[in-house]
Image: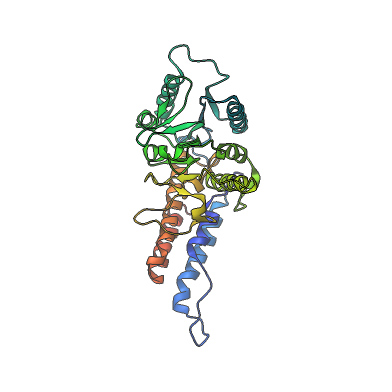
């Protein structure tokens, strides 16, 4: 039997809020207000039961079992002391990819230079080819090294010609699959705006191009990516969002323990607006304050793990997409809760729950 364990187990209770009946001043239960909560709780039980059953495999549609591709780039070392560290981080990524069967395309030191051209040419060729593949499996792009920013142009330093943020964006302009960027280098915050877009997740070592010093966030990120202790919500999966939070925390601890002024502040961007959010702007999974006129970052990253979507081994591509869209709708409703009256909120929540039950009857 194939048992599904969807990520929505943590999302629905948070969306419904407090399920206990409210009481009026006389101490009596306000049954008219408790009713929508009871309905929500009943639907949660029903949906949870539906998700813990055997899902028939549909042979006509491919399962989301492909672990995807990892383009692993180690840039120019600058100094040998940095180069050794970069290679150690890259090896952690390579080992992590082997654990999940992800294909690795390595570029940089200790890898033979391309037969024609340079590292920049090889990177362009690999990204243009891999990004154009129409698949639900992710394309991971991990850049380890140094960056520069002159106030106008942000670049990642390669052996030979460097690559700019606008060039990377152009090479990925026609991407037909999820893309996850790991920018483990100084000044990487200046890349975020150009690289952001739908179905993309960006982890940046710095919050801006003005953070120019050697970045250590990449080290902690490479260590955490397969660390089960990073499972903050204890759902037996480590999401990219959790990886970001834990690696950011360890980076902060390094500077605190060394009594140094922090010269880097990691950012997460996954809502496509190109702004990004620092780890300190979250309290647990929730943003400390709601950004104006845009959805907060973190929702998409919370649905993906190093292995892929949390449902990757159980669902077809369309089913995984449908589930992510439904979870996203739940999260968006939860974010609007403070601006809605109680009855309206629970009516909308009921619609979403009924929508899932109608599409997936027992």
Q: Nearer the viewer, residue 210 or 39?
A: 210
- 108 in relation to 191, above or below: above
How many numbered discs sit on the rendered protein? Answer: 0
Q: Quadrant of residue 201?
A: top left
335 to the left or right of 28: left
**Percent coordinates x, y for residue 55 in the rendering:** 54, 45
**Percent coordinates x, y for residue 118 in the rendering:** 45, 17
47 to the left or right of 88: left
Report if residue 222 is visible in the image: yes
Instruction: Quarter of the image for the N terminus: give it.
Output: top right
- 52 in relation to 98, above or below: below
Report if residue 354 is visible in the image: no
- 29 in relation to 108, above or below: below
> How has the structure been colored for display?
rainbow
- Residue placed furthest toward the top: 115
255 to the left or right of 186: right
Residue at 59% in and 24% down: 80
**Percent coordinates x, y for residue 250 in the rendering:** 61, 46
**Percent coordinates x, y for residue 15 in the rendering:** 48, 61
Q: Nearer the viewer, residue 113 or 256?
A: 256
Residue at 39% in and 46% down: 275
């Amino acid at each position: 039997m194939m048992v599904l364990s969807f990520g929505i187990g943590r999302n629905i209770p948070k969306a419904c809020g407090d399920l206990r009946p409210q009481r009026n001043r006389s101490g009596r239960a306000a049954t008219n207000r408790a009713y929508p909560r009871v309905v929500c709780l009943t639907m949660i039980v029903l949906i949870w039961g539906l998700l813990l059953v055997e899902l028939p495999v549909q042979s006509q549609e491919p399962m989301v079992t492909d672990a995807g591709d990892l383009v692993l780039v180690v840039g120019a070392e600058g100094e040998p002391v940095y180069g050794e560290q970069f290679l150690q981080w890259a090896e952690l990524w390579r080992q992590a990819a082997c654990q999940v069967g992800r294909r690795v395309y390595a570029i940089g030191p200790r890898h033979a230079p391309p037969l024609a051209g340079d590292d920049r040419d090889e990177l362009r060729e690999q990204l243009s080819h891999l990004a154009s593949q129409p698949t639900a499996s992710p394309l991971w792009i991990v850049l380890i090294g140094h960056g520069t920013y002159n106030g106008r142009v942000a670049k990642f330093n390669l052996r030979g010609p460097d690559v700019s943020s606008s060039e990377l964006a152009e090479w990925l302009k026609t991407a037909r699959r999820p893309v996850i960027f790991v920018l483990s280098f100084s000044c990487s915050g200046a890349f975020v705006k150009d690289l952001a877009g739908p179905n993309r997740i960006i982890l940046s070592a710095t919050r801006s191009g003005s953070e120019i010093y050697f970045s250590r966030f990449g080290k902690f990120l490479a260590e955490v990516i397969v660390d089960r202790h990073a499972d903050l919500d204890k759902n037996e999966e480590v999401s990219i969002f959790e990886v970001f939070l834990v690696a950011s925390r360890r980076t902060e601890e390094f500077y605190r323990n060394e009594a140094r002024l922090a010269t880097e502040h990691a950012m997460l961007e996954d809502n496509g607006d190109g702004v990004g959010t620092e780890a300190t702007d979250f309290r647990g999974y929730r943003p400390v304050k709601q950004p104006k006129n845009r959805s907060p970052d973190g929702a998409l990253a919370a649905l993906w793990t190093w292995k892929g979507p949390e449902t990757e081994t159980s669902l077809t591509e369309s089913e995984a997409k449908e589930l992510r869209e439904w979870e996203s709708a739940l999260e968006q409703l939860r974010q609007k809760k403070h601006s809605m009256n109680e009855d309206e909120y629970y009516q909308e929540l009921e619609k979403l729950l009924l929508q899932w039950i109608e599409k997936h009857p027992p």
